[in-house]
Amino acid sequence: MKNNKKKTNHSSSFGRLWSYLQAYRFPLYLAIFLKIVSVIMSVLEPVVIGLAITELTKNTLAIIKGVEGAHINVSYVGLVLVVYLLRGLIYELAAYYSNYFMTNAVQATVQDMRNEMTEKINRTSVSYFDKHQFGDLLGRFTSDVETVSNALQQSFLQVVNAVFTLALVIGTVLYLNLQLGAIVVITIPITFFGARFIMSKSQPYFKQQADALGTLNGFVQENLTGFNVLKLFGREDRSLDDFKEITEDLQKVGFKANFISGLMMPVLNGLSDLTYLIVAVLGGLQVLAGRLTIGNMQAFVQYVWQIN
């Protein structure tokens, strides 16, 4: 029941954020389109480099063996390099303008949210302020809105990037070599569920950290504005004890949240290194057997990095 409620809350929150973004469809959809273009160019990079490496390796071996007429195919390698440079140019332009248009859409959206919050506050009864700490309300206007802004501006495009990168890389590696491609694909659900498990453990502590920070902001604001009253009634020591208790609670949940989430990269890097090792060994054997080109071998290594 709790899981269904969480899913409903998350879906509802995303739906509300998406409704705000929909007011700026053109820059939003253009940013998504350009991000997809940049992903395609990024996925093409290992294959294009592989073409040049394979040709240079073949030409060099022919020269070493003394094959008559053997030479470096400069025209082919040069053409590949031109394609590589054009790919890089398209990638950089698409990535830059994707972030540019997404920033415009997000900042305009956040401005609308702040305006609505201000209008809401102006319509709110005085009794509401009596029941809620001013510092907590201030945090919603500043740090919470900024968190939403960062999430929309960074995480949204990262999700688009991850989804299309996974889809294109999976298709490419399976096309290049079914055996090695299967190994790369198998690591994806392992990585996903590993990251999801760590996130499920750290998220409750991040929520507690946000609540503790709101409590701290409210406490500091109220004690600073009422400092003369504290002095008048000699409540400085009691206020200091309360402050220490609040900051200690914030320190505890902050440590747990960041420590657990910090485990994600070491775990993912370990899985990535293991995949590198397996691909390198099996790929090397296939290169020696003539079933895989050296260029495609290096492409697989780069795709392992891209997926992780």
Image: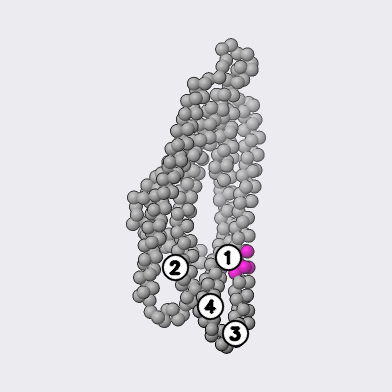
Residue marked by disc 2? 141
Upstream in sequence: badge 2 or badge 3: 2
Could you tell me residue 216's position as x and y percent? 55, 73
Q: Nearer the viewer, residue 117 or 65?
A: 117
Whether 273 is drawn above or below 250: the answer is: above
Q: Mark 1 points at which residue?
A: 205
Mark 2 and mark 4: span between their CA atoms? 20 Å
Nearest to N terminus: mark 4 or mark 1: 1
Residue 38 falls left or right of residue 62: left
Q: Is residue 18 visible in this depiction of the protein?
A: no
Could you give the CA–CA distance between mark 1 and mark 2, rounded to whole angstroms? 22 Å
* Residue type at numbered disc 2: Phe
Q: In this view, does 104 lie above or below 51?
A: below
Q: Nearer the viewer, mark 2 or mark 4?
A: 4
For discs 1 and 2, the disc positioned in front in the rendered view: 2
Q: What stretch is highlighted in magenta?
A: 250-255
- 230 within the magenta span: no
Decide if residue 100 is in sight here.
yes
Q: Distance of mark 1 from mark 3, alpha carbons?
A: 32 Å
- What is the residue that sits farthest to the top in this orientation? 68
Name the disc covering residue 235, or none.
3
SS label for mark 3: loop
Label 1 Cα crowd, 10 Å radius (few <14 / some 14-19 / many 20+):
many
Position of residue 273 in the picture relative to residue 173 (left or right): right
Return the x and y of residue 221 as percentages of the image width and height.
51, 75
Q: Residue at the location (54% across, 81% down)?
A: 227
Q: Which mark is first along the chain, 2 or 1?
A: 2
Query: Quick one: quadrant of the C terminus?
Result: top right
